[in-house]
Amino acid sequence: MIDLFETAMGVAGRIDKLIFSSRIRKTVFTSLILVLITLTIFIHFLPSPQVPEMPCPPDGYVDLGLQPTLWWVGGAPITPILFEMGLDPNSHIAYEVLLGTDKDNLSPLEWQYGGNKLGYLNHNLTSPLQPGATYFWKIRAKNRLNKNADGPVWKFSTIPLPTIEYFVADQEIIESNMTVNLSWSVINASETIIGPDLGTVPQKGDLTIVPLENVSYTLMASNFAGDRTYELHITVLENSTYNSVKMSEGHQ
């Protein structure tokens, strides 16, 4: 009887211990689930970074240089309690700069970083852009919880290369001491030069010259985007040779 009683009591103790342990595990598991749900809800309602705004160059700007600095205003609202504890996810904001000529396919550039204070941030382009092209760009702000705030897509156009409409001479083969009239027209140039020795000239004009020997004149039109050149050759012949050339042209 004693052995049977002791055996029964041992079994009862083990059953009670098992039930007690199961209840503890269930309580701990339930508490953990509640904590995770509460934390998820709390994180969900934490503020995201401010949407980037006030771009520079302004949206739609034209004739921009080929290696500009892109500016925008960024920042983030803080959660006071977390901020005081040094745990605010908006205390450190990363900004991804996206740029490209296709509005729907922008390429990421380098990340820039800032704090929560509202203010201007910038990105310096290290590689020159293409002249005469339209670019689209946007800024994506991300905090420490990877909560994003995408700015709108802005655009600007770079300055085009100069255009040489024409650079001509009224005659390209002349006799010694004859005059030549040069005419030219250039668009979108900050400086126009005719070499080798005529110097700076207006974007559009004409000039009478007396070449003493064979010479090649080069018109160079320049601006911030670069330069374009056009060459014009003048041949100066001796009188007898010049007359022979003209007679030959007349018989053609």
Image (cartoon, rainbow, N blue to C red):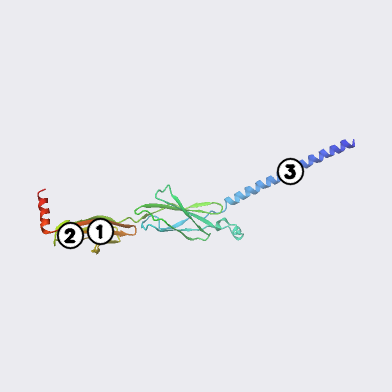
Quadrant placement of the N terminus = top right
Q: Amino acid at mark 1?
A: Leu
Q: Label 2, label 1: how many angstroms apart (C-alpha)?
A: 14 Å
Q: Which residue is mark 2?
A: 181
* Viewer-side residue, 233 vs 200: 233
> Residue 71 sits in which quadrant?
bottom left
The reply to whether callout 2 and callout 3 are in contact (CB within 8 Å) is: no
Q: Are marks 1 and 3 in contact (CB under 8 Å)?
A: no
Mark sitting earlier along the chain (1/3): 3
Residue 52's spot in the image, x, y percent? 47, 55
Residue drawn 68% across the image and 45% down it: 30
**Residue at mark 2 to residue at mark 3: CA–CA distance:** 106 Å
Question: Where is mark 3, residue-wise?
Answer: 23
- Left or right relative to 42: residue 245: left
Q: Position of residue 87 (x, y in %)?
A: 60, 57
User: Which disc is residue 185 wearing?
Assistant: none
Residue 55: percent from the left, percent from the top? 43, 57
- The amino acid marked with disc number 2 is Asn
Q: Which residue is mark 1?
A: 219
Q: CA distance from mark 1 to mark 3?
A: 93 Å
